[in-house]
Amino acid sequence: MLSLTTGLAPLVLAGLLGWTGAVKLFSRGTVLGAPKTALARMLSSSERAALVLRGVGAGELLIAAGLLAVPANPVPGAAAALLGAGFLGYLGYGRVLAPESSCGCSANEETPITWRAFARAAVVLVSGVTAAVAHGNWWSTVSGRPAGSLGFLAAAAVVLIALSADLDRWWLLPLRRARLRVFGHPLFGTGAGDRVPVAASVELLENSLAWQAASPVVRSALLDHWEEDGWRVLLFSGVYETAEGARPVSVVFALDATSSRDTPGDPVVRVSFLDADSGEPVGTELLSTVPSRKALPLAT
C-alpha cells in the first residue's frame, strides 16, 4: 500500500490540481464568483481577486503538468507542497476575516469555508511532500500493479469528490433526496399528502417563473405564512410603482403545501398584489406577466 501511495501520489495530485486549475483559469465562474470569496475581502477588489484566482489556476496547471511529465523530479512535488501550505494559510485567514465567504478553491464553490476546504488543502500539502520524496514514476506503478492502482485511484477519487463542496449537487443532494423519498422528512410523515417544511416551499417558489416575474415588486423576506384548502400561502411586502408614485403592497403567493423540488412538473403558483392599507387588488398589469396568475384572496 505504501508503494502505491508514493508511486501514484503525483498522478492523484496532478488530477486534483489540473481540475481546479482549469476551472479557475478558464471558467466564467471565476469572475462571477470572485466577489463572494474571502480573497475579494482581503484585496478589497473583486477584479483583483479574479486575476489572482486566474494566476493561481495557471500555476496549478503548470505544477500538474510537471507532476505528470517528470514525477521523479522533486521540483513539482515541492511546488505543490508549498501551494498546499499557502492554501492552508489563506483558508485560516479567510475563515477569520470573512467566515461567510467562499474560498474560491475551485471557482464554482459558493459555500462558506469549512473543514472540507482545509482537508483538501492538507491533501495537496501531504501529496506534494510525498511526490517530492518519491523517486519512481507513476506509469511504472500502474503498469506493474494495474489492479491495485485502479483500486487506489478509485478510492482517491471518492475522497477528493467528498472533499469538494461544489460537486455535492452531483452526488450528495441526490442521496439526500432519495433518503427523503424513502424515509420522509424527519419533521413530517411519509405519506404522499404530507406537508413539506415552509423553507422547502420558499425554495420552490424562489425558483419558479412566478417569482421571477413578481420579484421586482418584492421588498422583504418572508413575513408570514399559513395554509388554506391545501395551499400554502406565503406573504411578502413590496412596493408597486405607479404614475402617482410608489405604493406599498402585500405580495401573496400560494402553492401546493405538499410540493417540493422532487415533485414532477413545474409548480402551480397563485399570485396577488394587494394594497397594504385597503387590501384591494392592485397591479393587474403585473399579473398578466406572471404564470399561474389566479387571484388569491388575502386571508389569515
Image (cartoon, rainbow, N blue to C red):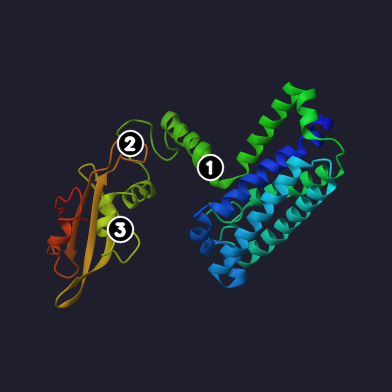
Q: Left or right: 298 with respect to 166?
A: left
* Residue at the image position 79 percent from the left and 42 percent from the top: 70
* Residue at the image position 18 percent from the left and 55 percent from the top: 289
Q: Are marks 3 and 1 in contact (CB under 8 Å)?
A: no
* Residue at the image position 78 percent from the left and 47 percent from the top: 128
Mark 2 vs mark 1, foreground winner is 1
Q: Secondary structure at mark 1?
A: helix
Q: How far is disc 3 from disc 2 in space, using C-alphas?
A: 24 Å
Q: How far is disc 3 from disc 1 in space, using C-alphas?
A: 31 Å
Q: Which residue is mark 1?
A: 168
Q: Are marks 3 and 2 in contact (CB under 8 Å)?
A: no
Mark 3 vs mark 1, foreground winner is 1
Residue 140, given in percent of the width and then of the height, sits at: 80, 29
Marking on residue 224 = 3
Q: How far is disc 2 from disc 1 in space, using C-alphas?
A: 20 Å
Mark 3 vs mark 2, foreground winner is 2
* Residue at the image position 79 percent from the left and 47 percent from the top: 77
Q: Quadrant of the C terminus?
A: bottom left
First in sequence: mark 3 vs mark 2: 3
Q: Quadrant of residue 252?
A: bottom left
First in sequence: mark 2 vs mark 1: 1
Q: Left or right: 158 with respect to 10?
A: left
Q: Quadrant of the N terminus?
A: top right
Q: Which residue is mark 2?
A: 263
